[in-house]
Structure formats: structure tokens, C-alpha cells
Image (spheres, helix red, strand yellow):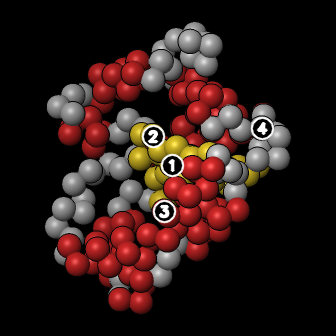
């Protein structure tokens, strides 16, 4: 059964937060754990005439990356994000990890090296965002991992998140 709050959350993100419109290219980034919200965002973006592009990761993708990536791979900037951040009108990132502590055992030098490789991409996001030519946002989708971190059950955490962003309102954008 689908949760109407997810559709209302997508309306908030598309209609209010990023103000997507006809012709806008939007990158939607998430893990597969956020599939219900990604589907709703994709659908709503199409409804308003935007061109959504989806970039999904599987839940333990970052863990595998840091376990196996060599120096060249750690230093390589993410191609699709770089392109989108430089040329698209918008980006919606949904934090949706199932294990918020997954990278706690990763060598800090590897994390730092990767952060250095992605710095120019994030700098582009910030610079274009400051001028208003790139509308971006980062939000989260309630997962069991986030619920555990919050000391809550999943259903209670979903209620908390959707209430906090007013997705439980009949018309959250008007709210």
C-alpha cells in the first residue's frame, strides 16, 4: 500500500523547494532504499514538464567502494554528478542509507582523499547555487537505519519525518 505522505513530500520538493518547471533538468540522487520517494519525485517532475535523471546507489555501495577502490579510483571525480552540477538546473539528493555507521571503520586517509576528489564538484554546486542558477537540496528518506539512530521504530520515525516536513498536511505546499 502506498503512503500518500510520500507523494505530498515529492510535491514539496518539486513544487516548493526546487520550483521545477518545464525544461528543467534535475538529477535525483538516492539509494535504492528511497525507491518510493524517487518514484514519486520522478513522476512529479515529469508532471511539471521537467527532465528527471535518476542516479541510484545500492545500500552498501560506499562500503564496497572504500574497501576496494585504488588510489586512482579514490581520486576520480564522479562523472555524472560533475556533469549535472555544472549544467543542470536542479539537484535533489535523498540521504537514504540503511546503515548510517557503515563508513565508521574506513581509513580516514581514504575518506579524505575521496573528499578532495569531490571538492570541485561540491564547489560548483555551491557557486551555482549562490547565483540561483542551480537549485539544489538535500533531504532524507526514513529508513530503518535512521530510525535506529534516532532510537525509534521505523513507523514512529516515518511519522516524525513526514510531520516535520508537513507531508502529513492535506496540501503541504500551500501550508
Q: Earlier in the sequence, mark 3 or mark 4?
A: 4
* Side of 86 relative to 169 (left or right): right
Question: Quick check: 175 left or right of 88?
Answer: left
The residue to which callout 4 is attached is: 21
Question: Badges 1 and 3: C-beta atoms under 8 Å apart?
Answer: no
Q: Nearer the viewer, residue 127 or 112?
A: 127
Q: Residue at x 52, y 43 (%)?
A: 137
Instruction: Compare marks 3 and 2 and give the one earlier in the sequence.
Output: 3
Point 35% across, 89% down: residue: 71
Query: Closer to the N terminus: mark 2 or mark 4?
Result: 4
- Characterize the local packing of mark 1: few (<14), some (14-19) or many (20 or more) Cα atoms within 10 angstroms: some
Query: Distance from label 1 to label 3 (Cα)?
Result: 13 Å
Element type at mark 4: loop
Name of the residue lying farthest toward the front: 131
- Identify residue for label 1: 93
Number of other residues with Cα within 10 Å of mark 3, as a class: few under 14, some 14 to 19, many 20 or more: some
Instruction: Please tell me the numbered disc located at residue 122.
Output: 3
Q: Are marks 2 and 1 in contact (CB under 8 Å)?
A: yes
Which residue has dot 2 on it? 139
Of callouts 4 and 1, the N-terminal one: 4
Query: Helix, strand, or loop for circle 3?
Result: helix
Query: Neighbour class for label 4 at 10 Å: few (<14), some, many (≥20)?
Result: some
Q: Is residue 9 above or below residue 105?
A: above
CB atoms of marks 2 and 4 within 8 Å? no
Numbered disc in front, either 3 or 2 = 3
Q: Upstream in the sequence, badge 1 or badge 3?
A: 1
Whole-number angstrom distance, CA of label 2 to CA of label 4? 20 Å
Amino acid at each position: 500500500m502506498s503512503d500518500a505522505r510520500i507523494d505530498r513530500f515529492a510535491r514539496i520538493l518539486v513544487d516548493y523547494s526546487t520550483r521545477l518547471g518545464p525544461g528543467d533538468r534535475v538529477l535525483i540522487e538516492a539509494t535504492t532504499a528511497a525507491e518510493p520517494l524517487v518514484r514519486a519525485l520522478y513522476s512529479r517532475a515529469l508532471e511539471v514538464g521537467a527532465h528527471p535523471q535518476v542516479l541510484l546507489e545500492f545500500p552498501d555501495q560506499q562500503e564496497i567502494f572504500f574497501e576496494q577502490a585504488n588510489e586512482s579510483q579514490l581520486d576520480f571525480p564522479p562523472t555524472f554528478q560533475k556533469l549535472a552540477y555544472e549544467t543542470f538546473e536542479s539537484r535533489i539528493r535523498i540521504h537514504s542509507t540503511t546503515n548510517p555507521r557503515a563508513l565508521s571503520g574506513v581509513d580516514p586517509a581514504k575518506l579524505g582523499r575521496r573528499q578532495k576528489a569531490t571538492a570541485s564538484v561540491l564547489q560548483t554546486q555551491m557557486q551555482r547555487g549562490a547565483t540561483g542558477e542551480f537549485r539544489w537540496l538535500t533531504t532524507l528518506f526514513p529508513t530503518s537505519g535512521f530510525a535506529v539512530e534516532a532510537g525509534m521504530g521505523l513507523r514512529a520515525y516515518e511519522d516524525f519525518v513526514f510531520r516535520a516536513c508537513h507531508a502529513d498536511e492535506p496540501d503541504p505546499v500551500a501550508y
